[in-house]
Image (cartoon, rainbow, N blue to C red):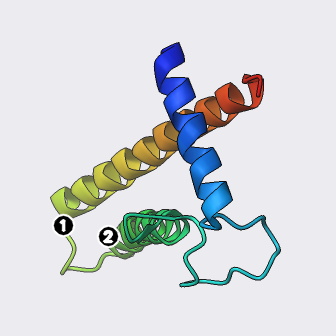
Amino acid sequence: MSEMQIQNVLQQMRQLSESGGVEAPGTGGGAGSGTGQAGGVDFQNVLRDSLRNVNEVQQNANDLQTRFELGDENVSLPQVMVAMNKSSLAFEATNQVRNRLLDAYQEIMRMQV
């Protein structure tokens, strides 16, 4: 991230803080109160929904695998393999997002204000 981009982000953070658009954690800004929202999208809810979707994909794959192993005639090997690959890709994508968020957090913490 260039110096100009960093300064731009810091300026936006200061403006939000001054305008009261950002509350400190634990200050009563519950869901839907505007905390953490940018452009009408709540990052916390998007992240939580994404993690729940990945969990559902993994549970579905495990369920299909178990049913196939128990001899359920309604479940075929290709269905199980596709579900397992979807599960693997979803987990890997989630892991990559987590890594990017951690890198961004660490970079922000290294900034001198």
Which image quarter holds the C terminus? top right
**Which residue shows up at 67% across the image and 31% down it?**
108
Q: Nearer the viewer, residue 53 or 28?
A: 28
Task: Give SS at disc 1.
Answer: loop
Q: Nearer the viewer, residue 10 or 40?
A: 10
Taking the view exactly as shown, the residue that stands out farthest to the top is: 2
Asked if labels 1 and 2 touch by Cβ distance under 8 angstroms, the answer is yes
Whole-percent x and y of residue 91?
45, 49
Task: Give SS at disc 2.
Answer: helix
Question: Position of 62 compared to 44: left or right?
Answer: left
Can residue 1 be seen in this snapshot? no
**Which residue shows up at 57% across the image and 65% down it?**
36
Name the residue that disc number 2 marks. Answer: 68
Asked where in the image residue 70 lies, by quadrant, the reply is bottom left
Q: Nearer the viewer, residue 40 or 68?
A: 40
Q: What type is the residue that disc 1 sits on?
A: Ser
Q: Measured along the vertical axis of the image, is residue 7 above or below residue 85? A: above
Whole-percent x and y of residue 21?
59, 66
Asked where in the image residue 30 lies, by quadrant, the reply is bottom right
Please tell me the numbered disc located at residue 76: 1
Whole-percent x and y of residue 33?
58, 83
Between marks 2 and 1, how big is the CA–CA gap? 7 Å
**Which residue shows up at 18% across the image and 67% down it?**
76
Can residue 41 be seen in this snapshot? yes
